Every structure is written in C-alpha cells, then in structure tokens.
Image: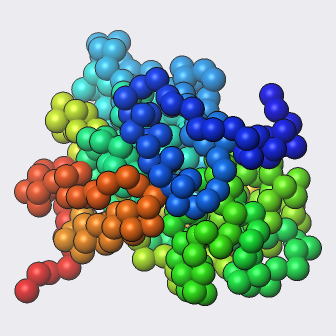
Amino acid sequence: MQNWQEKLASWQRKPITRRASLFALGYGLVISTSLLSCGTQNNQNQLQSNTPVSSNPTSTTASTPTATSTNKVVRVVRSKQLTALAVLEKQGTLSEKLAPLGYKVEWLEFAAGPQQLEAINTGNLDIASTAESPPVFSQAAGVPLVYLATTAKNGKAVSLLVPVNSPVKSVTDLKGKKIAFQKASIGHYLLVKALEKEALKLTDVESVFLPPPDANVAFTQGKVDAWFIWEPFVTRAVQKNVGRVLLDGGELRDTRNFYSTSRQFYQANPEVIKIFLEELQKAEIWSKDHPQEMAEMLTSVTQLDAPTLVEMHKKYDWGLQPITEEVIAKQQEVADKWYNLGLIPKQVNVKEGFLSPQEYAQFTPKEVLASAPQQN
C-alpha cells in the first residue's frame, strides 16, 4: 500500500484509468470533465470499487430468515453515523418484517455516496442513502436510479475542518490551499457554495478528491489544508484535537439527502420498499424522541461516547419527508449547477429518476405523505 507521500505525489503524475464496466466508463467521463474544469490532478483512487468496505459481506447480515424463507436478499447500505438508518439496523425490525416474505437483510458498508450508487448500478446494493449530488452524477453516467424518499436538510452535521493550529480564519484564507473531500458528495457541493459566498470559484482552491477514510488520514497527517466532511468525522477530529470547525453547513445547505434504488429493484420489489420506508420512519420518530437511548445504542457505531452523541443529536431534524415538486425542482438546480461548472458531461433531467405522486403514494408512509405542504 502506498504511503501518503507517494499518494500525494501520484496526484501530479497519474492519469485517470478507464474502468471495465459500462457504468464506470460513464462515471470516468464525469470525472475527466470535472478534472479539466477544476484544474486538479486526480489519483487512481478517485473512485472506490463497488466492493463494500466490509471484507466479509456475510458478516453484515442483520438476521437469519425463518426456515421457510427463500434465499432472497435485500442489501441496504450500512450507516456509520448518528442516523435512524443505523438505529434500524440495530433494532432489527426490518429483518423481522421481511423474513415472512422470504427475505433476509444484509447491511453493507461503503466509503461514501458515489460508491453506493456505483454498487446500485452494478447490482451489488439495493437501497442507498446519499446526499443530493451522488444521484446527479450517477444520472449523468446513465444510471437508471429511482429516488424513494428524502429527509430534512441537516446542514449542521457537515463541516469544513482545518487543522487545530492552522492560521486559516475564513474561507478566503483557503485560496490556493489543498482541500480534501469526496468527489460528488455533500462536502463537494457545500464547498462550492461556501466559495461562491466569498466570490471565489472551485478553481481558486486545490481540490483533493479522497473518500472519507483516506481523507481522514491525509488531514490527520497534515497533508491537506482543510477537509469538508460530515459527522461523526467532524466531532472525532475536534475531540482528538487535530481539527477545528471553520464553518458548518447550517446556513449553506439548501438540499436534502435521498434514499434511492435501481429502477429494476423498484419494479420487482415494491412491497419490500414499502416495508423499508415504514420501518425507517418508525426509527426516525423513535430517534427523535429517544436521544439518550439512541446515543447509547450507537456509541460503538460512531466511536463516540453517549454524552457527545446526545449533544450531536441537536444538529438534526428527524423524520422522512415526501417527494414534492419543490424537492424535484431543487434537485434539478443541483444538476444544472454541476453541469454549468463543467463537472458532469451532459445536462441531466432529474425527473427521469423520480416517480409520479400516485406511485409514491403506493409505498410512502401515510404520515410522511400527510406532511407534504398543501398545494393551492
């Protein structure tokens, strides 16, 4: 394995390699376009493989199905954050509900959203949980994904970190500096927003595309000047006294997270999706009402103590939200922004990934549908 000095040096000399799969070819075009636009040298680790982080996928099985069940499997992304999705895995209710239908649940871990959606496309994951940008990049690469549900904005849970002793006091001080983030992530999107707020462009900084685990090492070792990342990485860095928050996304973020799947999985498994969203919404409400219990449940997941997680709980709004015309319009704005910046190779019509209101009504929990604003 390369050390960090070799990895950093490789950014200056390694071209992007073509991937074997059709999806990756499309994604490679997205990456190549973005590199030309950003003026940033990439490395061959820009995109992770669609292999889950866990080296033993069977170890991620949430529960064993009943003896009468078949071998059908639902693969859901594993959350390592303070989320209702992590609670859902811990509580085991999804496995209980799906077992009578002949399904077992596997929870698979990925580095970030783009890797999840690559796995969705190649059939190695069924349900993903990402921010707004990964689906846009995937749609630009021709992935037939379906947006299932959305969440609150929760911008305070994403922050721009600088080393604890850094002289940087504002975003403008980062001009010409190395900033790490996962490409096509919420960190990427919010960095663009933060720079625009100061009349700067993405080309005014040196973008270092790294998935969170690698970015964590680079930041800790002082190889980059800043890092745009989400919780619990933020709090861990602060607690370890290696980073401080320059700004958070509370006022910057105007987008939401999405749960998504492939169109093939949606068409073949509507009842599974319905049960998943119903159980997820129950976990959302439970998480909202039980911050202490949630914190104690997820200490091992987040590697943070319960009191810290209780405090972190205040950064979030809880509960799924319905897909509305406003949500779709905002997602189109995101797609247009990436296209106008030259970071995706073609214009994307995000509506191709959304369903009709009638279709959403078939599987969205009733209380979530009822929370939609009334149209005049």
Q: Position of residue 212 (x, y in %)?
A: 66, 50
**Where on the picture, by quarter, is residue 347?**
bottom left
Which corner quadrant holds the N terminus? top right
Query: Is residue 366 visible to the viewer in this orientation of the structure?
Result: yes
Using the image, determine if residue 19 lies above or below residue 285.
above
Which residue is nearer to you in this view: 77 or 94? 77
**Where on the picture, by quarter, is residue 307?**
bottom right
Q: Residue at 50% of width from left, 47% of height from top?
A: 31
Q: Residue at 25% of width from left, 33% of height from top?
A: 265
**Where on the picture, by quarter, is residue 126?**
top left
Which corner quadrant holds the C terminus? bottom left
Q: Position of residue 64 (x, y in %)?
A: 45, 21
Q: In the image, is 176 to the left or to the right of 91?
A: right
Using the image, determine if residue 244 lies above or below residue 217.
below
Using the image, determine if residue 326 lies above or below residue 360.
below
Q: Residue at 80% of width from left, 84% of height from top?
A: 169
Q: Position of residue 322 (x, y in %)?
A: 25, 65
